[in-house]
Image: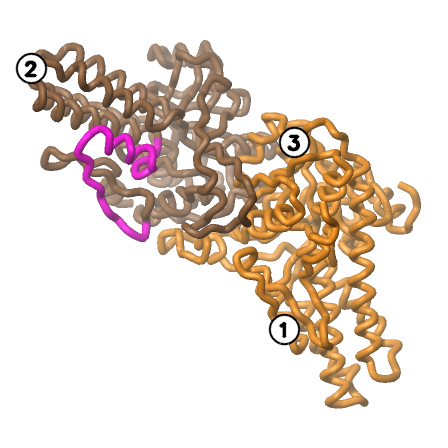
Chain colours: A brown, B orange
Amino acid sequence: MNMKQHDSIRAVVWRDDSLFLLDQRILPQQQQFIELRNARDTANAIRDMVVRGAPAIGIAAAYGVVLAAREHYRNSPQSWKKQIQIDLKILAESRPTAVNLFWALENMQQCIANIESDPFPILLKQAEKIYQDDIAANYTMGRLGASLINNDGRAVLTHCNTGSLATGGFGTALGVIRQSFIDKKISAVYADETRPWLQGARLTAWELVQDKIPVTLLCEGAAASLMRQGKVSWVIVGSDRIAANGDVANKIGTYSLAVNARHHGVKFMVVAPTTTVDMNIASGEQIPIEQRATDEVLACGGKRIAAEGAAAWNPAFDVTPAELVDVIITENGIVQNPTLQKMQDMMRGKPV
Amino acid sequence: MNMKQHDSIRAVVWRDDSLFLLDQRILPQQQQFIELRNARDTANAIRDMVVRGAPAIGIAAAYGVVLAAREHYRNSPQSWKKQIQIDLKILAESRPTAVNLFWALENMQQCIANIESDPFPILLKQAEKIYQDDIAANYTMGRLGASLINNDGRAVLTHCNTGSLATGGFGTALGVIRQSFIDKKISAVYADETRPWLQGARLTAWELVQDKIPVTLLCEGAAASLMRQGKVSWVIVGSDRIAANGDVANKIGTYSLAVNARHHGVKFMVVAPTTTVDMNIASGEQIPIEQRATDEVLACGGKRIAAEGAAAWNPAFDVTPAELVDVIITENGIVQNPTLQKMQDMMRGKPV
C-alpha cells in the first residue's frame, strides 16, 4: 500500500484562509469541495452530512469557530468574544450524538478565554492542532489495534465509514484495518453497506479501493451469515460517543453486529480517540440518539421507495453495552472488557 | 379492515387463457402486469423477480406448466409429454432455494403422468387447485398464528414480503399479522426494509397501507435497537424452505433477526405452508442458498453506489437453525420448538 494514497483523502481542508469540506453526500461518483464562509454554514454542512464521522465533525467545528472569530473580530474587535457565543451554540446544535463536536467546541472556547489580541491566528493554530492531534491518535490506534489481530486467514468486518473521511486522516477502525493490512495480518475486508446513508458502500469501499485493500460489500442483513460461516475473526467499528462505563454509541446497525459477534464467537473491537470518550455520562442510556428524517429510509438512492402512508423509524445511532465489547482502543491504550475503572485509568494515561 | 382490500392484490392472475404476473420489481410506483406466453418466459420472470415469494413462485410455475402443455400438445399431440420435460427443467432451474417451486412442478408432473387427452383443461384445473389450496392454507395459518399473539400493547416485526404478493393471497407471516390486527391483538407493525431488493419498503408497506394497518419501516441495522427498547413481542417471518429438523431458510437478514430475538427475549415465529417443508433434507446445511448478482448490492435504487473495484457478497437467503425458532406454523398446525419428530408428526397431520 502506498501510504500517500490514503493520505491524499482529506475530508476537511483549510486553504488560502478558507475552510473547504469534501461533500461526502455525493461520493464516490463526484468529488467536490464546498467552501464554508462562516459558522452557520459550517453548522448546516455538519447537519446535512457534507462532513460526517465523529472526529471529522469535531475538526470541522473547530475551523467553524475560526471562521466565526474572524468575522466577529473584524466587525467588532471589542465584543467579538460575546458575539461568537451564538455561533458556538449554533455549531453545538448541529448534531447531538458525537461528543467530539462538543469536545472541540469546548477546547476552542477555552482557547478563546485566553486571547487578548486578533483571535484568528491563535484559533487557527488551535484548530490545526486538533486536526494534527487526531491524525497522530489515528496512527497510534492503528498500531495498537493491529497488535491484537492474528493472521488466521480470516477477514474482518467493519460498519459505516471510519477512515480518512471520518477523521483527520488514516481513520479509527479503518486505521486499524489499514495497519493490519500493512502488517499482513489480514488480506481482505468485509464492509456493511450501512443503510440508510450507505457510508460503507460509498465511502469505505472507495477508501479501501484506493488503498488496494480487497473489499467486499454486504447488506447488513447478511452479516450474521458471514459470521456463521467463519469468514471473519473481528468486527472492528468506530464510535460517536463512549460512556464512562464503556458503553458505545455508534452508527445504527453496530449493536446488531455486537450481538451477532458474541453469538458466533467473533471478537468485537471499538476504535476511537479519547475525544470520543465522555466521562461525564455514566452509561450509554444517557447518550442522546439522533433521530433523522424518515425520508432517509422511505427513499433509496434519491428515489422514493415506500408506499405513501408508510412511516419510518430512523435512529442514526445505537448503543452497544460494554459487556458486548471485547476491546476499546484509544490513543491512550488498549482497554479489554471495559469497565468504569479501566476507562478512568485509560483516560488518566495509566496502563490498563 | 376491509377484507376485500387485500383480496384485490394478486401477484398471479390467469385470465382469458393467459398468465399475467404483477411486475413486483416496479411496485409500488407502477402497477403493471406482464403477460407470459410460455414456460421459458415464465422461468425468466421467476429468475428476474417479476414474481417472488416461495408460494407465489410455485403457483406461477404451475401455470407455466399449463402454458407449456398447451404449446406442446398443439404442436404434437402424440409426444407432448416428452417435449414438456425440457420446460419443466427450465422452470426448475429458475431459482434454487424455494422448495415450493419444485413441489409445484412435481405436483404437475404427477398430474401429467395420468393424462390421456388434451392436457390443457386438466392441468389448468390442477394449477387452480394449487393456487386455491395456498390461499386456504394462508387463512388457516393466519388463525393459528394469531392465536399465539397476546395483546400486550407491543408491535410485531416482520422481514421481506410474505403477503398477498408472495402467496396465493392473504399471506403467510403477513397473514398472521393481518389476522392479529383483525383480532385486535396488535395495532402496529414494524417492517424491515429488506435490502437489497427492498421488499419490505416496496411491497409489505404497500400491502399494509392498503389494509390500513399502521406500518413503520426501518433499516435492518435498527432491528436490534427496536428489540432492546421492548417495542416488539414477536418477530414473524415466512420461509423459502424448511428442513426436516426445523431449520428455516428465508430472505437474507432473517437469521440476524433470530439471533437478536433470542438475545432480547423476543419470540420468533415462522409461517409457511407444508409445500415449503422439505422432509427430504435433514438440516438447513443442505439447503442450496442462491447467490445473486453483485450489482444488487453495489447499486441502490437503480443507481451505482459503490466505487469501481469493490466486490460484493449477495446471498439471497440465510438459514436460521431450529433452536432459534420458537414456533413454526403450517396449515397442519403449530410446531413449538421444532424437532424432526415434531415436524414428521405435523406433516402426517398428527397433533403436535
Tell me residue B195's x, y (percent).
53, 48
Among all residues in the image, which is located at the extreme right? Answer: B350
Of tags 1 and 3, the one toward the viewer is 1
Q: Which residues are magenta?
A: A28-53
Q: Are marks 1 and 3 on the same chain?
A: yes
Name the residue at the front extreme. Answer: B2
Q: Nearer the viewer, residue A40 or B51?
A: A40
Quickly name the residue at label 1: B35
Label 3 environment density (alpha carbons within 10 Å; few <14, some 14–19, many ≥20) = many
- The residue under label 3 is which amino acid type? Val
Residue tagged 2: A117
Q: Could you tell me which chain the residue with mark 3 belongs to? A: B
Let me know if residue B264 is in the magenta part.
Answer: no
Q: Please name the amino acid that badge 1 sits on.
A: Glu
The residue that label 3 is drawn on is B232
Question: Of helix, strand and loop, which one carries label 2?
Answer: loop
Q: Secondary structure at mark 1?
A: strand
| Up/down of A24 relative to A132, above or below | below
